[in-house]
Image (cartoon, rainbow, N blue to C red):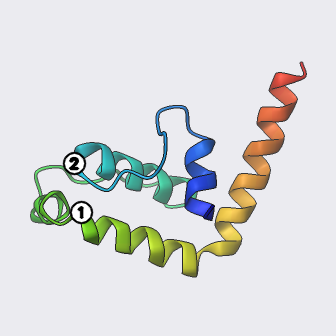
Amino acid sequence: MSLIDDWCETKEEYHGIIAEGEKALDQLNDLCKDLGYKKDGFLYGSSLEKFFLDNPGAVEAIHDWIEENYEDELDDYLTENCEEDNETEHS
C-alpha cells in the first residue's frame, strides 16, 4: 500500500485513490492542503480543471509525483492524524 493510499484511509469521504471526475479534483485539493498548501482551493471552471477531467492519467501522475517528492511530509501528516484518531477512539 502506498502513502497516498494510507492518506486516503484517514479521510472518511475517500475510499481509495480517485482519478476521475470532480471527486478526483476535490481529493487532490485536500491532499495538497494536508501537505501545507492551505491558501486557495482549486479553481473550478478553469482550463486546468477541464484538462484533469479529460485526462485521469494526469491526476494519477500527480499522485505518483507527490508520493515521490513529499514522502516525509505525507509520512508526518499520517503520523499526526493516526495519533489523533487513536486518541479520539480511546477517549
Q: CA distance from mark 2 to mark 1?
A: 8 Å
Point out residue 25 in the picture as x, y percentages from the top left corner: 30, 52
Provide residue 73's location: percent of width, then percent of height: 67, 68
Q: Label 2, on which residue? A: 21
Q: Residue furthest right?
A: 90
Query: Quick one: label 1, few (<14), some, or many (20+) residues within 10 Å?
Result: some
Q: Is residue 62 above or below residue 36?
A: below
Q: Nearer the viewer, residue 26 or 12?
A: 12
Q: Is residue 79 left or right of residue 35?
A: right
What residue is at 13 percent from the left and 66 percent from the top?
A: 51
Q: Quadrant of residue 56?
A: bottom left
Residue type, mark 1 in image: Pro
Q: From the viewer's perspective, is residue 65 above or below residue 39?
A: below
| Helix, strand or loop for disc 2 | helix
Relative side of 80 to 67, left or right: right
Q: Is residue 82 left or right of residue 1?
A: right
- Which residue does the image show at 63% across and 61% down from the upper left? 1
> Where residue 19 sits in the image (x, y, percent)?
32, 56
Please identify the quarter of the rendering in which residue 60 is found.
bottom left
Residue type (three-letter) at the residue carrying disc 2: Gly
